[in-house]
Image (tube, rainbow, N blue to C red):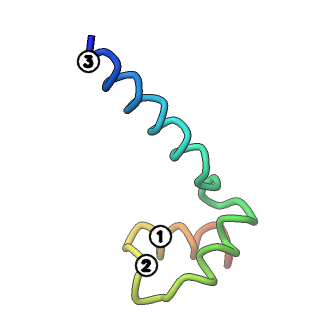
């Protein structure tokens, strides 16, 4: 019973947290990345930013 409750809690929490992130390439995502320190960008973020927000 406890394992099932823990699993359900994890699934619900993960669903709620993952829904908060804007879609890569969206205007909101570009704006959010511009506000983030460039030293904290991942290689994928740099590539996606160049692809979707600059060109």
Q: Which mark is residue 2?
A: 3
Residue at 65% of width from left, 65% of height from top? 29
Relative to residue 30, is residue 17 depicted above or below?
above
Residue at 40% of width from left, 82% of height from top? 40
Residue 21, how many percent across, how many down?
58, 54
Instruction: From the image, tell me which residue sits under label 1.
Output: 45
Quarter of the figure that contains the C terminus: bottom right
Are circles 3 and 2 on residues that touch, CB within 8 Å? no
Mark closest to the chain's N terminus, 3 or 2: 3
Question: Which of the 4 image quarters holds residue 34?
Answer: bottom right
How far is mark 1 from mark 2, CA to CA? 6 Å
Q: Residue furthest right?
A: 27
Mark closest to the chain's N terminus, 1 or 3: 3
Are circles 1 and 2 on residues that touch, CB within 8 Å? yes
Describe residue 24's horizontal placement relative to residue 26 as left or right: left
User: How would you rate the neighbour count of disc 1 (Cα within 10 Å): few for under 14, some for 14-19, many for 20 or more?
Assistant: some
Residue at 47% of width from left, 70% of height from top? 45
Describe residue 13's horizontal placement relative to residue 26 as left or right: left
Residue 28, how many percent across, how many down?
72, 65
Q: Which mark is residue 21?
A: none
Describe residue 15's horizontal placement relative to residue 4 as left or right: right
Secondary structure at badge 2 equals loop
Residue 25, how many percent across, how many down?
65, 61
Q: Which mark is residue 41?
A: 2
Q: Of residues 33 and 52, which is closer to you in this image? A: 33
How far is mark 3 from mark 2, CA to CA? 39 Å
Quarter of the figure that contains the N terminus: top left
Question: Which of the 4 image quarters holds residue 50?
Answer: bottom right
């Amino acid at each position: 019973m406890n394992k099932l409750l823990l699993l359900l809690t994890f699934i619900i929490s993960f669903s709620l947290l993952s829904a908060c992130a804007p879609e890569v390439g969206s205007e909101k995502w570009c704006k959010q990345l511009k506000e983030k320190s460039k030293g904290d960008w991942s290689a994928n973020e740099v590539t996606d930013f160049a692809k979707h927000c600059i060109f």
